[in-house]
Amino acid sequence: MPTSRFQPSSIKNKVKREEVARKQKKAKRQDKLQRRLAQAKAEANDPLAKKKRLAQNVPRTLDNTRVYDPSMLTANPHPEPGPSTLASQDDFANNSNAQPEVEQQPQDEHAADIATDPFAAYFSGAFDPTVPPKVLVTTSPKATRTTYDFCDEICGIFPGAEFIRRKKGKGFEMGRIAGWAANRGYSHLIVVNEDMKKPNAITMVHLPEGPTAYFKLTSVELTQKISGHARATAHYPELVLNGFVTRLGHTVGRLFQTLFPPMPEFQGRQVVTLHNQRDFLFFRRHRYAFRSPEKVALQEIGPRFTLKLRYLKKGLPAVKNLGAPSKPLEFDTEENEQQQEAQALKEVEMGEAAPQDHEGEGEAKPQEQKQKKVVPPTEDEYLWIWKPELETTRRTFFL
């Protein structure tokens, strides 16, 4: 049966066909405009109608349909009805006195993580809140001018940052630099890596016990390239962390928190934002101004860049074969066995006399512990590392 609606494509004359199609599109636009104006007029008189419409018309995005992660510290927003869920619903329907089981979140484990992680001293108030953390900023070997300019921007972001050029040659591995900085009172180490004469990665090390986080760096835009940017001042900025919902995300967020002083200077009206969306960390810095009691204006200071976590290590970066000389060749002979037996007897005799000697050395032990130097490990221990097979769907996120 032929369709009852008139189709412009049935007109054979090209000029007439285009004219009819143009009139139809104009009529549709006008009809849509009139409906929107009528809807806006009705919602102006009834604010509840607008709230109801917005509550019903929620768009489906990758963010609000993400795959549920058991390490999330919030409730499961979209529980999927599986066989166990349906069975529990049937049991609940049969037994009216039964109560539905609520999925427990790892709050206790997260509280234990917070109490024992390396950042606990910062949040416990052990340090002076008016003194900014000391941050050492350096680069990869043989860096170029573009990376140095980005390091200058980094030093302007963190109030206690200091830039030192990395020397060329052996003996300046990242682990050795971290140990050197920890022994001199630095609380963080930031290493900016470059590739093809452009900064492409950032390594953040929390001193003296770690952890070490490695981020890929993209979309770098310096302050001078931002149109209408504001001038930064020496005031301590406020910090806004948004979108960190998992235990791994909280660890990364607390790492960034320790880079800034606990007490911001509100008179500077500067705010640093780290927004997590789909595991991309968008960094922005603004200055806000109160135009009226209800309106606030923002002016970007810069710089702007994007980070993505690739791995998180426990402790400092490792240095392979740290202070380990090559072992000489050894041969098993009867003389060596006799020497080993004699040495074992001496150790036993010394062990019996040790308690008397340690009584006088009790006062010297605390001094030795205070003077103990931070030494980087020889092997890396990963807490989390990104792999392509982890992203089973486009809706799988980890922070």
Image (cartoon, rainbow, N blue to C red):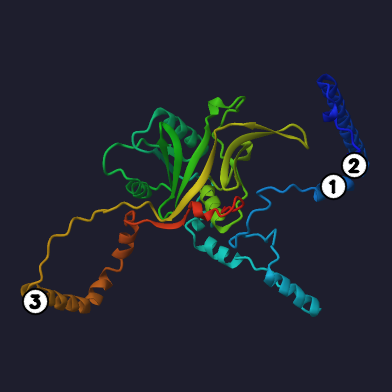
* Residue type, mark 1 in image: Arg
Q: Position of residue 131 (x, y in %)?
A: 50, 45
The residue wearing badge 1 is 53
Q: Position of residue 208 (x, y in %)?
A: 40, 53
Near-viewer residue (141 or 385): 385
Q: Nearer the viewer, mark 3 or mark 2?
A: 2
Image position of 33 (left or right of 308): right
The residue wearing badge 3 is 338
* Residue type, mark 2 in image: Glu
Q: Nearer the viewer, mark 2 or mark 1?
A: 1
Distance, label 2 to label 1, CA atoms, is 10 Å
* Residue type, mark 3 in image: Gln
Image position of 93 (left or right of 221): right
x 61%, y 55%: residue: 245
Q: Nearer the viewer, mark 1 or mark 3?
A: 1
x 32%, y 54%: residue: 375
Q: Earlier in the sequence, mark 3 or mark 2?
A: 2
**10 Å neighbourhood of mark 1: few (<14), some, or many (≥20)?**
few
The reply to whether dot 2 and dot 1 touch (C-beta < 8 Å) is yes
